[in-house]
């Protein structure tokens, strides 16, 4: 490879790294930009040697999935997915949820938390006649969609139904699904609140509330919507709260929404230990595109997620790669929900091996076996960087992350 990967240390007075997007100019401190100024991140923070398997502390579960007191059909559905040993968050939270306790689950993305709450809730739905009885709130359409897909797999043959209530798609089908009185409502705060205001969603029979990726929901400004939604449901309910972090705002939500919660923390260090992180220096935008194209022709770039800064820049970059003979899909806010789902499915099914995305569009995505994350544009904050690289190296697997920066002088 002709591109150069470098390791940095020392002073934070280095020249700021490049953050221009391909076809966009948001970020940095240039005049006339929209959105908050990009925070400077020293290049050394984009570098980390991955922990080898020998350095890992392997979690040994106390249970097997077969040990959990689930019904025969649910056990069958779990086996069909090939699940044998639970992850740490599953092993520790499933028994608590089955007992009806309120739970705070602190876990990194990619640790299996969706199954950790879905399986025991499905089991507890046996014999429940009032509907809907479960509300699951997620920060993004894609995450809500993934939860709904997993629900349908686990609930096969159990006569349990769900309604997916998210923005960006036609509301008529969602209204039809709600009229069927589903057991589970899975949705994003904005559309849920909208249909509540139209009196198409009533929450007086809800017995279980799940807030998934609560920290992301607060980051995205959903706190007022969440308060409105939760205030409309019975106080006597089971509440499950999943987050990567506990901030003062989240602590406030915990006090307001949960009763005597049990906290299960399986969170590891903030930077994914299994991700080899390097920087790649580029002279300018065109040089960066040349280097990226060259990299993607490499044999080991099996399934690559590229992050850009703007919707326009992401689409331009994806189009450029396509025209260069590297099939790719783009996912960003200018695409409607069905376009985003189609692109995501192509990438998941490995019909294309490159997906270019903005931060917002990629939040909450669960994509298995991503070999590389490439930061074509540097992130707004270091927290965003951690979120980006967390798309690879999931579940203890190894992964690689490259970040493009300006040549250090």
Image: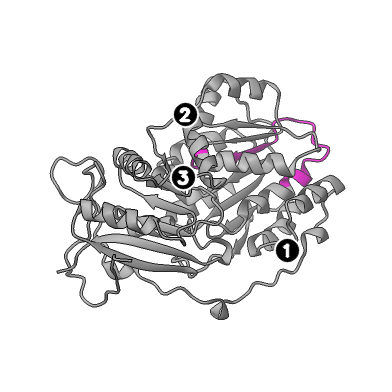
Mark 3 highlights which residue?
Answer: 217
**Left or right position of 326 against 347:** left
Q: CA distance from mark 1 to mark 2?
A: 37 Å
**Left or right position of 251 against 111:** left
Look at the picture and state if 246 lies above or below 216: below
User: Does any portion of residue 292 appear in the rendered image?
Assistant: yes
Q: Quadrant of the N terminus?
A: bottom left
Q: Upstream in the sequence, badge 3 or badge 2?
A: 2
Look at the picture and state if 384 lies above or below 63: above
**Residue furthest out toward the right:** 72
Q: Residue at x 33, y 61 (%)?
A: 403
**Left or right position of 318 against 100:** left
- Quadrant of res 60: bottom right
Q: Say if mark 1 contacts mark 2, CB within 8 Å.
A: no
Per the rendered image, the range of residues in magenta is 121-141
Q: Which mark is residue 100?
A: none
Q: Nearer the viewer, residue 310 or 231?
A: 310
Q: Residue at x 79, y 36 (%)?
A: 128
Name the secondary structure under disc 2.
Answer: loop
Look at the picture and state if 59 lies above or below 284: below
Mark 2 highlights which residue?
Answer: 168
Find residue 376 and report its horizontal and vertical position in percent: 32, 53
Q: Residue at x 82, y 61 (%)?
A: 67
Mark 1, residues whose alpha carbon is within 10 Å: few (<14), some, or many (≥20)?
some
Q: Quadrant of the C terminus?
A: bottom left
Name the secondary structure under disc 1.
Answer: loop
Q: CA distance from mark 3 to mark 1?
A: 30 Å
Q: Which mark is residue 85?
A: 1
Q: Nearer the viewer, residue 198 or 86?
A: 86
Find residue 162 and report its horizontal and vertical position in percent: 67, 33
Q: Upstream in the sequence, badge 1 or badge 2?
A: 1
Q: Nearer the viewer, residue 40 or 216?
A: 40
């Amino acid at each position: 490879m002709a591109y150069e990967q470098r390791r940095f240390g020392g002073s934070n007075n280095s020249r700021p790294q490049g953050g221009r997007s391909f076809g966009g100019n948001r970020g940095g401190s240039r005049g006339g930009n929209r959105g908050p100024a990009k925070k400077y991140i020293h290049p050394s923070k984009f570098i980390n040697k991955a922990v080898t398997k020998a350095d890992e502390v392997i979690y040994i579960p106390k249970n097997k999935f077969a040990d959990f007191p689930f019904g025969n059909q649910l056990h069958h559905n779990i086996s069909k997915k090939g699940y044998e040993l639970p992850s740490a968050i599953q092993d520790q939270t499933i028994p608590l949820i089955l007992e009806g306790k309120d739970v705070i689950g602190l876990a990194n993305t990619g640790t299996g938390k969706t199954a950790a709450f879905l399986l025991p809730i499905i089991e507890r739905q046996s014999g429940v006649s009032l509907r809907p009885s479960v509300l699951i709130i997620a920060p993004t359409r894609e995450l809500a969609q993934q939860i709904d897909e997993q629900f349908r797999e686990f609930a096969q043959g159990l006569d349990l139904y769900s309604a997916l209530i998210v923005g960006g798609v036609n509301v008529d089908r969602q209204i039809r699904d709600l009229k069927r009185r589903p057991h589970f409502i899975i949705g994003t705060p904005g559309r849920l609140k909208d249909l509540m205001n139209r009196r198409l969603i009533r929450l007086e029979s809800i017995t279980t509330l799940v807030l998934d990726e609560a920290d992301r929901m607060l980051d995205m400004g959903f706190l007022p919507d969440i308060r409105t939604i939760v205030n409309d449901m019975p106080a006597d309910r089971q509440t499950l709260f999943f987050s990567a972090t506990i901030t003062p705002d989240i602590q406030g939500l915990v006090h307001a929404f949960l009763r005597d919660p049990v906290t299960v923390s399986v969170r590891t260090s903030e930077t994914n230990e299994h991700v080899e992180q390097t920087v790649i220096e580029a002279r300018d935008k065109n040089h960066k595109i040349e280097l990226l194209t060259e990299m993607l022709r490499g044999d080991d770039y099996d399934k690559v997620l590229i992050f850009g800064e703007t919707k326009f820049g992401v689409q331009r970059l994806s189009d450029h790669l396509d025209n260069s003979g590297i099939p790719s899909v783009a996912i960003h806010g200018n695409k409607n929900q069905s376009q985003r789902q189609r692109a995501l499915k192509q990438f998941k099914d490995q019909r294309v091996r490159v997906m270019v995305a903005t931060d917002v569009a990629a939040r909450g995505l669960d994509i298995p076996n991503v070999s590389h994350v490439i930061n074509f544009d540097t992130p707004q904050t270091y927290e965003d960087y951690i979120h980006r690289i967390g798309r690879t190296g999931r579940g203890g697997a190894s992964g690689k992350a490259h970040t493009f920066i300006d040549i250090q002088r």
